[in-house]
Amino acid sequence: MSSKGYRFWPFLLFSALLLLLWLASWFAGVAALFSSSGEGFNSLFSGEGMRWALCTAEASVDGAPWGALAMVVASVGLLVSSGMLTTLVGLFGRLPLTAVRRQAGLSALVVFVLFVALLFVSSVAPWNIFASVTGDWASSSLAQGWLLVLLVVSLSASLMHGSLCGNYRTVGDVARGVSGVFALFAPAFLAVLPASGIVPCMQYIGVLTASEPVAALLSDFLCWLPFLFVACVEGLSALKRL
């Protein structure tokens, strides 16, 4: 988990893009002064634009998926520090495993299966989680809560594995495993700040005319992109070391 400059590339890229949007809106405002029709893009440097920017800055940052990002990073930290990823590669691959690690891996898989099974069995009509009251899959309980269920199950399985194979002997071991991955993705969290403001600025200027659900999905994608970038680069480096 060495500190490498590439991790700050998303922050620099999104900051530069946000600055370019502001500069483009300024040029658009200047061009509108000389336009006979008086129509064009909205300028963020106008009085109304500055009021909009100041009023929506906090809302844009608050709208970023901070909770989901933190949970995913914590889950990755436990999966790595508990040794569960290495064990899974050994169970389904060709890496040799000790008896203790094999037992820990199988126990973690049992915990995972039991949690998922409990989710269905605990309901009188298990198929109801696949559809909402109106029958729409997008509004079903499973579609709304699958990420939280997956993260909780993976956290439980990781804690089980780390405890059985000896990687987690104290609470400090768990804390160090999570904090190490948070340090790895710290620049990605910084990149969320400018990323969360790109889509709202594009909407105000007028270069993006999308519906609210599509705009929210695009904004969330930009917030997740730095984490995917760091994960891909670090994952490729880890594969090369195997």
Image (spheres, grey):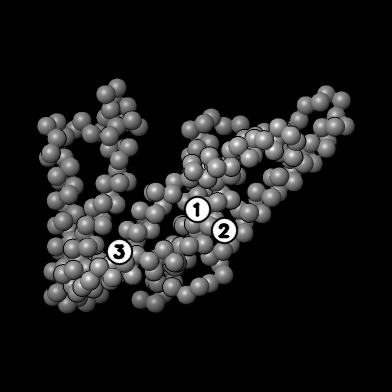
In this view of the protein, which residue sits in the foreground, 183 or 128? 183
Kindly report the distance in space between the C-alpha atoms of the residues bearing marks 3 and 2.
25 Å
* Vertical relation: 29 (above or below) 156: above
Q: Amino acid at mark 1?
A: Leu
State whether residue 15 appears in this view.
yes
Quarter of the image that includes the C terminus? bottom left
Asked if the residues shown at circle 1 and circle 2 are in contact, with their CB atoms under 8 angstroms apart, the answer is: yes
Sort mark 2 into few (<14), some (14-19) or many (20+) by Cα contacts within 10 Å.
many
In this view of the protein, which residue sits in the foreground, 20 or 168? 168
Label for residue 132? none
Asked if the residues shown at circle 3 and circle 2 are in contact, with their CB atoms under 8 angstroms apart, the answer is: no
Question: Looking at the image, which residue is at 21% across and 77% down?
Answer: 96
Q: Is residue 135 left or right of residue 52?
A: left
Of the two numbered discs 3 and 2 on the same chain, state the one appearing first in sequence. Answer: 2
Q: Is residue 34 left or right of residue 57?
A: right
Kindly report the distance in space between the C-alpha atoms of the residues bearing marks 1 and 3.
21 Å
Q: Secondary structure at mark 2?
A: helix
> Which residue is at the far top?
134
Label for residue 225? 1
Residue position for label 2: 10
Please provide percent x and percent y for residue 132. Answer: 28, 27
Quarter of the image that includes the N terminus? bottom left
Residue position for label 3: 78
Sort mark 3 into few (<14), some (14-19) or many (20+) by Cα contacts within 10 Å.
many
In this view of the protein, which residue sits in the foreground, 170 or 75? 170
Q: Amino acid at mark 3?
A: Leu
Q: Amino acid at mark 2?
A: Pro
Please provide percent x and percent y for residue 89. Answer: 27, 68
